[in-house]
Image (cartoon, rainbow, N blue to C red):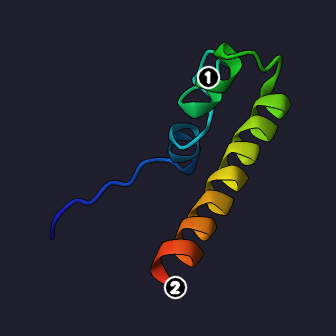
Amino acid sequence: MSDVQFEDEDVMLAETSKFNRDGEAKGLMKLAMKLGAKNETQASYVLIGIMVACLIATMYVISRYILS
């Protein structure tokens, strides 16, 4: 039989976190904070706003150029 070992659940959860081990944000959250967001909540709102704007722009392009 082969010896299969799994990582602990805590280690896996820590790797998928949106923060580094230092407590510092990473990825798009870090970029939003560099651009002027004061905390993680405000950065989340900025990213959600960008997502909504992109969704509206995509729907406009689809309705204007694809469906007509």
Tell me: 49 left or right of 68: right
Q: Residue at x 32, y 54 (%)?
A: 5
Q: Amino acid at mark 2?
A: Ser
Q: Residue at x 57, y 38 (%)?
A: 14
Tell me: 14 left or right of 38: left
> Could you tell me residue 31's position as x and y percent?
59, 23
Residue placed most toward the observer, 27 or 37: 37
| Quadrant, the N terminus | bottom left
Q: CA distance from mark 1 to mark 2?
A: 40 Å
Q: Residues within 10 Å of mark 2 (few under 14, many from 20)?
A: few
Q: Which residue is mark 1?
A: 30
Tag 1 and tag 2, C-beta contact below 8 Å: no
Q: Residue at x 60, y 39 (%)?
A: 17
Figure check: 32 above or below 52: above
> Could you tell me residue 57's position as x and y percent?
62, 58
Numbered badge on residue 12: none
Tell me: 3 left or right of 8: left
Q: Amino acid at mark 1?
A: Lys
User: Is tag 1's residue or tag 2's residue first in the polypeptide sequence?
Assistant: 1
For mark 2, give the secondary structure.
loop
Q: Which residue is mark 2?
A: 68
